[in-house]
Image (tube, rainbow, N blue to C red):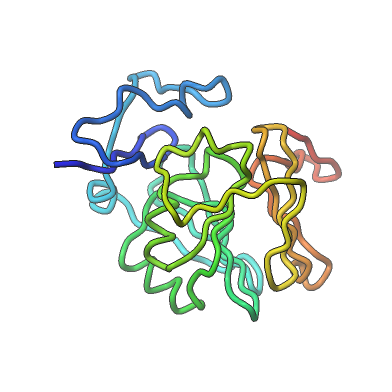
């Protein structure tokens, strides 16, 4: 029986196979790592038995979704709400009934956009559940471990979405690394959602670029 195996180190779900993949190319890449115990695999069903998601408001119109206890590299997704539909920025691996109900109560998901491959997680499961389109930059096409028609690869430097949202290719950490500009964020001052493409330094006066 085929299974969509999940890498325990980075949380990426793979195309269905009878046996676990020999290795995770994302973790073998120099920008990631293989754990001390070697390559380990799990499934979404196993993950649902061991973990839950914590869902909490970050600010009006922005909701954080993270898994407890921590899984993979501790990714967090952000749900951005707009009058024209919601965007799930970045993705986490665990998707369960409680999370689906909570997200639907917030208006569901129209689009999924992900900063870079370390957040690809179970993006196809999320897209199929919410009938959403995934936007990834074409420069990171090779890092998609579970291809699916829900994925749209875009090219160039910027991609307008809806609700004033814009995807911007920054590169750096990965060639297709992208950030999301949310003009209504931070009480109308505007916010940039970046994953770890751009990181705020410890004293908060500076940022660093991967």
Q: Is residue 71 above or below residue 82?
A: above
Tell me what residue is drawn at x 28 percent, y 49 percent.
Answer: 44
Image spot of residue 108 (x, y percent)? 48, 73
Tell me what residue is drawn at x 39 percent, y 42 percent.
Answer: 146
Q: Is residue 7 above or below residue 81?
A: above
Image spot of residue 174 (x, y percent)? 64, 33
Please indicate whether residue 103 sits to the left or right of residue 52 in the image.
right
Q: Image quadrant for the C terminus?
A: top right
Image spot of residue 124 (x, y percent)? 41, 53
Q: Image quadrant for the N terminus?
A: top left
Tell me what residue is drawn at x 58 percent, y 65 percent.
Answer: 87
Looking at the image, the residue that sits furthest to the left is: 1
Front residue of 32 and 142: 142
Asked which quadrant contains residue 54, the reply is: bottom left
Q: Is residue 35 above or below residue 149?
A: above
Front residue of 44 and 48: 44
Front residue of 133 and 164: 133
Image spot of residue 55 (x, y percent)? 47, 64
Please indicate whether residue 60 sits to the left or right of residue 6 in the image.
right
Please indicate whether residue 181 sits to the left or right of residue 114 in the image.
right
Q: How many marks?
A: 0
């Amino acid at each position: 029986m085929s299974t969509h195996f999940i890498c325990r180190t980075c949380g990426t779900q793979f195309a269905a196979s009878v046996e676990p993949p020999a290795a995770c190319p994302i973790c073998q890449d120099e920008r990631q790592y293989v754990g001390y115990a070697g390559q380990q695999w799990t499934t979404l069903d196993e993950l649902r038995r061991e973990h839950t998601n914590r869902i909490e408001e970050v600010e009006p119109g922005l909701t954080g979704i993270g898994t407890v206890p921590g899984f993979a590299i501790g990714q967090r997704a952000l749900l951005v709400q707009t009058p024209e539909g919601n965007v799930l920025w970045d993705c986490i691996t665990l998707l369960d009934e409680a999370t689906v109900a909570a997200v639907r109560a917030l208006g569901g998901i129209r689009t999924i956009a992900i900063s870079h491959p370390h957040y690809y997680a179970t993006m196809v499961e999320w897209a199929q559940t919410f009938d959403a389109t995934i936007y990834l930059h074409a420069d990171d096409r090779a890092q998609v471990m579970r291809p699916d028609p829900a994925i749209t690869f875009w090219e160039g430097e910027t991609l307008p979405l809806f609700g004033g949202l814009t995807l911007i290719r920054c590169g750096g950490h990965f060639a297709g690394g992208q950030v999301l500009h949310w003009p209504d964020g931070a009480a109308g001052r505007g916010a940039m959602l970046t994953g770890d493409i751009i990181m705020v330094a410890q004293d908060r006066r500076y940022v660093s670029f991967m």
